[in-house]
């Protein structure tokens, strides 16, 4: 049996969808179908992939309009009679075909205040209890597929890339803020550069995360609470005003 | 040449997996200016896929462990062909490197008293692998990536592929690369190059590797005149997925066996008891009872008092055992063996300890590993052979060239133990960074790159665009993979290897005629065409080295020489380029010093 893939072909200047027929086999995933097209019909069809096992987060695309990892999306999820559309992530500029320019994400990451550990025990190592790191390990599962960034309306529809870090980086900040060894604070970053206030908790990001990270409940909401505690608590507000860096001599 | 984008660095690191990142961090810490190049986006290198853990004798989980035992296990696992100094450095330095990662933010699973938890793995006498569930590589690469991003002095070039190294009067002076996004060439001028490009798995059809694994670093080093050693030793991991077709080769972590999983044939027999080699008899259980007791003790967090199950023998042994069961008609329906953890551990334990495996089988193979056995079989996994380096500095035999990680040879001898690669990346990545920075600092000469040479290479790289109607690069790659699997696979023979050499000639001729469609911008067909050259070089090196080693040892099995031969016990097979010809020599391995010999023999 065959399936028809309707794939976006084009670049920053524009493009169109083109149909390709691929033979189906048991257990096939969308990425297999893309590879088949590359090998037999369009050797210059651009896509990213590495692990083919849902671990690297390279093969993100919109399959029938839904943000997915192509290597983990089975062809038998779809009606064989209908073409399956495959398009690049919408929230980022297209480079070519299914590849888009995600470099903005790497720039955002650079601005997050880095990990800053407390001093180790006398033997040079640290003690931590498993139950204290469980919640941080959840955040550290992130494979940087940027599917959450793609669906978040603040980035997707409102183009707030200059003032909003996006769910991926709230997860990243949470992994640092809740790290039992970390002593730095990132609430100022979240409020001022990260723009966490723009998130209105729609949970769209959580729904698409292939690592099932509960982005909204476990990362964003607790971070919002920290920001409120640090920024809008009247006592702290007064303290912050008194100790503002630009007031120092 | 002025028309090419050009950059200058003290040290150019090619590859951003664990080894490349660790090297870049160290070189920058020494004050060198560093360029870091990778074919994919940052954080997507192969290291991200590592599952089981990083081997380091921290002795947290079993206090009897020590660097000496780790050294002994590594040497015995490598069938004594290892560069013993590298094995010693690995065993001594790995614990500090792992703890250092923790100081950079990595969060490993914990013991009840809050230290780094360690798990059992094949060939390691004690539980030794620090891990994070079954996503250790992700934890490692993310930690190193963040450290890199916040290390001043490192410029990162993502989706940029090095196509050739450049030399000036016998020394490394630069590299020519192209950007995937635009197809444009970039010239890097540098005093030192650290190759950290990983392995060669894409030379085989059934493999656990990504598209990046085309042996670029091996071939770049070879072309630059460096020695390659141990190229006959390709590791076939015993447990890759075998069904459905679409996932054939994808890795099933050895952690499944470390957590108590057992291998069975179609008759329900735990066949590994029949395959325990003489050398390991004293260390492995000979009854199911004893093996089960070991698992029970280890799971309960107690120190094991009995011998370990034979499923935890080294990879070469287990891979061959599965292949033999299949050959003798006791295979699973799709030509593998059954790996069963469902009947050994509780579903919630399996999901906690092996979450990615659970998900991988559930979503891709419709198998619930908490209820059903997995079907597994050998898959091409890791390259033991590689660039010959100096143990202390990772310097290759060409001045200015360094190599670390999977692309470097020597450390693992004839067979790598699981978990030793991730520690290799940390220990020798750091050493390569130190070595390259020191070399760059010490070298004051003025290095040139040859504009005419660069133009000529650029023209050669672009040739496929002119071959209208030429060979399809994917088809040639496919042909090569089939050929290597058939003639240079797990079981080898003189006649098969000779056939492989003549097939390689034919494939080389086809590769010279490949044509690609479209333009230079993000064109995977073109990228495959460029990679073919590297794949052909490494395939030839593997084949020639395999011909030369007329014995069976570790991962290298010759059906026409089924035994290990004393004459080959102390030699490396060295591949190098002489003019345009590939030459192969046997060279003696320096003898093991007495102090280390006593450790290997278990006398210390
Ligand atoms: C599925 C799987 C599981 C594994 N599990 C374990 C485990 O549990 N424990 C363990 O110890 N080992 C494990 N291994 C092995 C281990 O992961 C690898 O050997 C190791 O990660 C290799 O690291 P590296 O730094 O040498 O190279 P890689 O991480 O592969 O990085 C190579 C880098 O080089 C770049 N590169 C390559 N060619 C070029 C070029 N021409 N130009 C520019 N850049 C280039 C790539 O883009 C990439 O950035 C596993 C391997 C696999 C496949
Ligand atoms: S919950 Fe917040 S971050 Fe997530 S998609 Fe909605 S607005 Fe975006
Ligand atoms: S948080 Fe989830 S969806 Fe977002 S980048 Fe990470 S893995 Fe992808
Ligand atoms: S290829 Fe790695 S997640 Fe799909």
Image: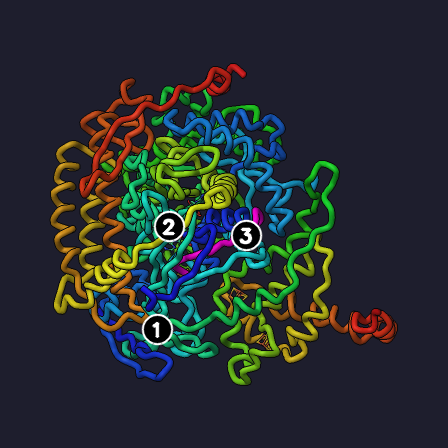
Counting from the top left corner in percent of width and height, residue B401 is at 39, 43
Residue B391 appears left or right of A1 = right
Question: Which quadrant holds residue A226?
Answer: bottom right
Crowding at dot 3, Cα within 10 Å, few <14 / some 14-19 / many 20+, comes out as: many
Kindly state the secondary structure of the residue where label 3 is placed: helix
Residue assigned mark 1: A78
Q: Are marks 2 and 1 in contact (CB under 8 Å)?
A: no
Residue at image point 70% right, 65% down: A186
Residue at image point 26% right, 58% down: B452
Say which of marks 2 and 3 sits in front.
2
Q: On residue B14, which mark appears?
A: none
Crowding at dot 1, Cα within 10 Å, few <14 / some 14-19 / many 20+, comes out as: few
Residue A235 appears left or right of B435 = right
Q: CA distance from mark 3 to mark 1?
A: 39 Å
Residue at image point 49% right, 42% down: B442
Q: CA distance from mark 2 to mark 1?
A: 53 Å
Picture quarter with the C terminus of chain B: top right
For the residues beneath circles 2 and 3, the answer to whether they share a chain is yes
Q: Is residue B187 shown to the viewer in this render?
A: yes
For the residues beneath circles 2 and 1, the answer to whether they share a chain is no
Counting from the top left corner in percent of width and height, residue B494 is at 15, 32
Q: Is mark 2 within 8 Å of ligand 1?
A: no
Front residue (pair B434, B539): B434
Residue B382 appears left or right of A130 = left
Residue assigned mark 3: B144
Q: Chain of mark 1?
A: A
Q: Is residue B505 above or below residue B178?
A: above
Look at the image and give the residue range highlighted in magenta.
Answer: B29-40
Q: Are marks 3 and 1 in contact (CB under 8 Å)?
A: no
């Amino acid at each position: 049996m065959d399936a028809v893939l309707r794939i976006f072909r084009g670049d920053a200047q524009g493009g169109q969808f083109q149909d390709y027929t691929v033979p189906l086999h048991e257990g096939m995933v969308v990425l297999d179908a893309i590879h088949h097209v590359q090998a037999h019909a369009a050797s210059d069809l651009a896509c990213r992939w590495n692990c083919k096992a849902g671990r690297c987060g390279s093969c993100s695309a919109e399959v029938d309009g839904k943000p997915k990892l192509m290597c983990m999306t089975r062809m038998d999820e779809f009606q064989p009679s209908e073409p399956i559309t495959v398009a690049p992530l919408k929230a980022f500029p297209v480079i070519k075909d299914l590849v888009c320019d995600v470099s903005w994400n790497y720039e955002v990451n650079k601005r997050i205040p880095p990990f800053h550990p407390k001093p180790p025990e006398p033997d040079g190592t640290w003690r931590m209890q498993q139950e204290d790191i469980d919640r941080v390990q959840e955040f550290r599962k992130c494979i940087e597929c940027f599917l959450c960034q793609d669906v978040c309306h603040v980035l997707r529809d409102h183009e707030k890339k200059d003032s909003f870090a996006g769910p991926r980086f709230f997860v990243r900040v949470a992994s640092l803020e809740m790290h039992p060894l970390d002593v730095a604070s990132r609430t100022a970053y979240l409020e001022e550069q990260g723009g966490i206030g723009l998130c209105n908790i729609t949970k769209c990001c959580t729904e698409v995360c292939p690592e099932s990270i509960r982005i909204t409940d476990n990362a964003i909401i607790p971070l919002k609470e920290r920001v409120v505690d640090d920024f809008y608590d009247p006592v702290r507000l007064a303290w912050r005003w008194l100790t503002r860096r630009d007031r120092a001599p | 040449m002025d028309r090419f984008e050009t950059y200058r660095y003290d040290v150019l690191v090619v590859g951003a997996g664990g080894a490349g990142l660790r090297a870049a961090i160290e070189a920058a810490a020494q004050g060198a200016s560093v360029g870091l190049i990778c074919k994919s986006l940052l954080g997507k290198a192969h290291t991200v896929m590592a599952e089981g853990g990083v081997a380091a004798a921290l002795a947290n989980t079993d206090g009897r462990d020590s660097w000496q035992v780790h050294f002994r296990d590594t040497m015995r696992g490598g069938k004594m062909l290892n560069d013993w100094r590298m094995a010693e450095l690995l065993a001594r330095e790995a614990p500090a490197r792992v703890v250092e990662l923790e100081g950079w933010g990595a969060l490993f699973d914990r013991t009840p008293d809050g230290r780094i938890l360690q798990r059992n793995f094949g060939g390691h006498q004690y539980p030794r692998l620090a891990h994070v569930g079954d996503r250790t590589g992700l934890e490692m690469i993310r930690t190193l990536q963040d450290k890199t991003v916040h290390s001043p002095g490192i410029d990162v070039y993502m989706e940029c592929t090095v196509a050739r190294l450049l030399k000036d009067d016998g020394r490394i002076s630069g590299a020519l690369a192209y950007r995937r996004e635009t197809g444009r060439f970039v010239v890097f001028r540098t005093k030192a190059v650290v190759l950290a490009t990983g392995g060669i798995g894409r030379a085989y059809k059934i493999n656990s590797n990504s598209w990046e694994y085309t042996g670029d670093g091996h071939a770049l080093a070879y072309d630059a005149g460096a020695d390659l050693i141990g190229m006959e030793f390709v590791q076939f991991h015993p447990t890759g997925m075998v069904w459905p077709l679409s996932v054939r080769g994808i890795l099933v972590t050895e952690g499944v066996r470390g957590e108590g999983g057992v291998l069975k044939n179609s008759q329900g027999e735990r066949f590994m008891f029949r395959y325990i080699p003489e050398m390991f008899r004293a260390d492995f259980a000979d009854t199911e009872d004893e093996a089960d007791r070991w698992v029970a003790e280890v799971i309960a967090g107690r120190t094991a008092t009995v011998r370990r199950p034979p499923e935890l023998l080294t990879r070469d042994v287990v891979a061959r055992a599965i292949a033999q069961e299949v050959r003798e008609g006791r295979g699973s329906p799709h030509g593998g063996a059954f790996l069963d953890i469902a009947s050994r551990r509780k579903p919630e334990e399996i999901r906690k300890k092996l979450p990615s495996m659970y998900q991988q089988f559930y979503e891709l193979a419709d198998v619930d590993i908490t209820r059903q056995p997995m079907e597994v079989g050998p898959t091409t996994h890791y390259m033991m052979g590689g660039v010959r380096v100096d143990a202390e500095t990772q310097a290759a035999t060409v001045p200015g060239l360094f190599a670390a990680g999977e692309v470097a040879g020597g450390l693992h001898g004839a067979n790598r133990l699981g978990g030793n690669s991730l520690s290799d990346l940390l220990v020798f990545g750091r050493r390569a960074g130190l070595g390259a920075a020191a070399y760059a600092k010490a070298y004051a000469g003025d290095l040139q790159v040859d504009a005419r040479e660069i133009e000529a290479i650029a023209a050669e790289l672009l040739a496929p665009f002119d071959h209208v109607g030429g060979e399809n690069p994917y088809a040639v790659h496919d042909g090569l993979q089939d050929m290597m699997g058939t003639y240079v696979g797990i079981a080898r023979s003189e006649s098969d290897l000779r056939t492989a050499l003549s097939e390689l000639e034919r494939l080389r001729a086809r590769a010279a005629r490949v044509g690609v469609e479209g333009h230079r911008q993000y064109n995977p067909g073109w990228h495959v065409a460029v990679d073919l050259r590297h794949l052909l070089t490494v395939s030839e090196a593997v084949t020639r080295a395999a011909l030369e080693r007329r014995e069976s040892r570790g991962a290298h099995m010759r059906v026409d020489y089924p035994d290990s031969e004393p004459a080959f016990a102390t030699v490396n097979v060295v591949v190098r380029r002489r003019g345009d010809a590939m030459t192969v020599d046997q060279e003696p391995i320096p003898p093991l010093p007495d102090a280390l010999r006593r450790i290997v023999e278990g006398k210390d």
